Image (cartoon, rainbow, N blue to C red):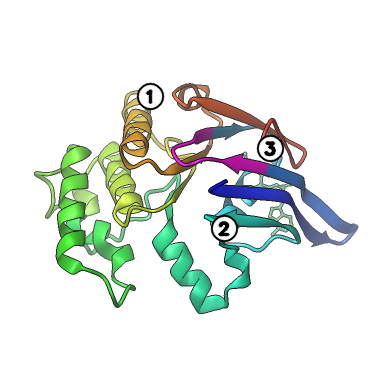
Amino acid sequence: MPLTVTDLRKDYPTRSGPLAVLAGVSLTLADGDAVAIMGPSGSGKSTLLHILGTLDRPTAGTVTLDGQDPFAFDDAGLAKFRNERIGFVFQDHHLLPQFNVLENVLIPTLVNPHRDAVALEAAARQLLDRVGLGSRLDHRPAELSGGERQRVALARALVQKPKLVLADEPTGNLDRKNAHAVGELLLDLHRQQGTILIAVTHSAELAGVFPRRLEMNDGRLEGGA
Ligand SMILES: Nc1ncnc2c1ncn2[C@@H]1O[C@H](COP(=O)(O)OP(=O)(O)OP(=O)(O)O)[C@@H](O)[C@H]1O
């Protein structure tokens, strides 16, 4: 399977011994799959997303994306893998205030020395058109609404056509109307690009637009494998 997660475990050391935050998570997803992960606070959802995003390493278990184990790479290889293969959308947009909309979308591409700058700029413009911001390319983040900023963040996550898109509470800072619009866009863009999409959310409304929902409880994912 394109994404295979097998018996993933994460322990954090605490004064009273290791805390098992992920207690054996398994999940297989095919190209074009989209799942929302829900579950109580502290159940391990963000920890799982961080490990899938290679921002943190598991204590045990394996993750493979198209047959590659990212944790087998050295730090430079891992950074390259993350940059090229994984798109991130966070609750906070994380746009850089001194750069305009188009530049913000292109920022993840700058670290790739072999990038095709012309093609990437065309992709960025096309995505920004698609999210309704084609006429705001030279605006700074401060000159946009909260919903617009999050739409720029969607374009930034997708500009390099990642294999896997990870969204951690992507509509958490938005009012109901903007949350609905950003949720629909996230799914539309996912369908258009055929990515694997995993979102963690407390929002039943956002989870409702996903074709599949999984529940995390005490470090275990129900129905994942
Ligand atoms: N660096 C750390 N050291 C020790 N414990 C940690 C660390 N990071 C997270 N935890 C603990 O791991 C557990 C799971 O945290 P996580 O952020 O994955 O939960 P979550 O399901 O995403 O919660 P929420 O819905 O509130 O965001 C929590 O009990 C948290 O306190």
Which segment did they paint magenta?
27-35
Q: Residues within 10 Å of mark 2 (few under 14, many from 20)?
A: few
Mark 2–mark 3 Cα distance, whole angstroms, equals: 17 Å
Which one is in front in this view, the residue at disc 2 or the one at disc 3? Answer: 2
Decide if ligand 1 comes within 8 Å of the CB at mark 2.
no
Quadrant occupied by the C terminus: top right
Which one is in front in this view, the residue at disc 2 or the one at disc 1? Answer: 2
Q: Which amino acid does the dot numbered 3 rest on?
A: Ala
Residue 78 appears at what percent x and percent y? 52, 70
Which one is in front in this view, the residue at disc 3 or the one at disc 1? Answer: 3
Name the residue nearer the viewer: 129 or 223.
Answer: 223
Residue 15 falls left or right of residue 65: right
Which residue position holds label 1?
Answer: 176
Q: Residue at x 30, y 77 (%)?
A: 113
For residue 36, what is the image quadrant?
top right
Residue 131 falls left or right of residue 198: left
Which of the numbered marks, if any, corresponds to residue 225? Answer: 3
Q: Residue at x 62, y 71 (%)?
A: 72
- Asked if residue 94 can be seen in this view, the reply is yes
Secondary structure at badge 1 equals helix
Which of the numbered marks, if any, corresponds to residue 67? Answer: 2
Mark 2–mark 1 Cα distance, whole angstroms, equals: 39 Å
